[in-house]
Image: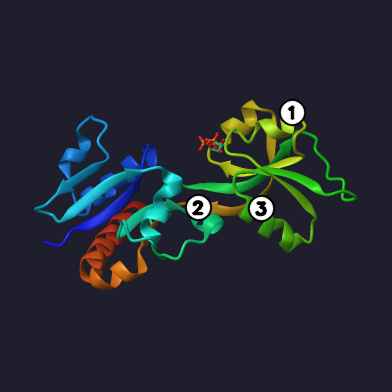
């Protein structure tokens, strides 16, 4: 059988999502073994999974190294990869938000300093508001920036809100809700469309069950 190559985001979300693929009849038991391997194959089922850094999944799919992958909507909005977004997996739910120190007020007479990992999302959001900004691109621990006076606000992912709370920050505005999406390489989708559609149908009935 022709192999379906699937890039999963390494970590808690990836494990959750793998369980969904497993329940859809695309299981690969070796992936559950505790080791540091990155590729797992079930020839009988025609599936090959690999663990990829979450922010890299879309690159593997865009370039066809993976036929399918699971990426957060945040990554798809930020990098706009040339892939098909096949479905919302309704997991990994969180939101992209603007946050600031308690008591923050915006001084509209000067550019707003925005610290973020998501420079394109932040730029588009403030362009839509006609607000001038100065983007400070960071790679992590974004919450530190307003505390140390490096920025006025942050644009970041908020899930439970615990990180903000523990750092005395609060949400000023929600930009967009985020969840995990199933994505496909455009050319490979055509060659493997029947199997991919079988998988999508199984995942759909699974997520609908969950939402009932
Ligand atoms: C993300 C995000 C926040 C945190 C939000 O960080 O950047 O820091 O999760 O979650 P919470 O609302 O449940 O506290 P991540 O763990 O991805 O690490 P990062 O510092 O690399 O962004």
Residue 25 visible in the shown view: no
Dot label at residue 122: 3
Question: Which corner quadrant of the image does residue 53 belong to?
Answer: top left
Q: Tell me the CA gap for discs 2 and 1.
A: 27 Å
Residue sticking out furthest to the bottom: 190
Give residue 10's position: percent from left, percent from top: 36, 40
Which element carries disc 2, helix, strand or loop? helix
Q: Which residue is mark 1?
A: 148
Q: Secondary structure at mark 1?
A: loop
Q: Pointer 2: residues within 10 angstroms few (<14), some, or many (20+)?
A: some
Q: CB at mark 3 closer than 8 A to ligand 1?
A: no
Residue designated by label 2: 75
Q: Is residue 45 above or below residue 165?
A: below
Q: Which mark is residue 130?
A: none
Mark positioned earlier in the residue sequence (2 or 1): 2
Which residue shows up at 79% across the image and 61% down it? 130
Q: Residue at x 25, y 70 (%)?
A: 193
Q: Is mark 1 within 8 Å of ligand 1?
A: no
Labels 1 and 3 touching (C-beta < 8 A): no
Q: Is residue 83 left or right of residue 174?
A: left
Q: Are marks 3 and 2 in contact (CB under 8 Å)?
A: no
The spot of residue 164 in percent (x, y) is 63, 33
Task: Tell me if mark 1 has few (under 14), some (14-19) or many (20+) residues whose alpha carbon lies within 10 angstroms of its own.
Answer: few
Residue shown at 27% from the left, 32% from the top: 36
Task: Give the tally of numbered discs.
Answer: 3
User: Gap between marks 1 and 3, in whole Å?
Assistant: 20 Å
- Percent position of residue 212, x then y: 35, 55
Q: Secondary structure at mark 3?
A: helix
Between 18 and 93, the residue placed more toward the observer is 18
Query: Along the line of sight, which residue is nearer the eye, 101 or 190?
Result: 190
Disc 2 Cβ-to-ligand 1 distance below 8 Å: no
């Amino acid at each position: 059988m022709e192999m379906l190559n699937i890039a999963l985001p390494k970590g808690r979300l990836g494990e959750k999502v793998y369980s969904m693929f497993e329940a859809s009849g695309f299981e690969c038991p070796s992936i559950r073994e505790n080791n540091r391997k990155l590729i797992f194959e079930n020839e009988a089922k025609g599936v090959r999974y690999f663990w990829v850094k979450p922010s890299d999944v879309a690159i593997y799919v865009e370039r066809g190294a993976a036929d399918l992958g699971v990426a957060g909507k945040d990554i798809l909005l930020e990098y706009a990869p040339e892939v098909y977004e096949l479905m919302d997996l309704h997991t990994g739910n969180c939101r992209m938000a603007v946050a600031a120190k308690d008591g923050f007020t915006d001084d509209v007479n000067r550019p707003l300093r925005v610290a973020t990992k998501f420079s394109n999302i932040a730029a588009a959001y403030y362009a839509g508001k006609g607000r001038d900004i100065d983007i400070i691109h960071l790679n992590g621990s974004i919450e530190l920036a307003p505390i140390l006076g490096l920025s006025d606000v942050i644009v970041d992912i908020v899930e439970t809100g615990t990180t903000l709370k523990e750092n005395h920050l609060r949400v000023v505005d929600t930009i967009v809700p985020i969840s995990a999406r199933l994505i496909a390489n455009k050319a490979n989708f055509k060659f493997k469309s029947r199997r991919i559609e079988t998988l999508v149908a199984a995942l759909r009935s699974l997520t609908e069950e969950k939402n009932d």
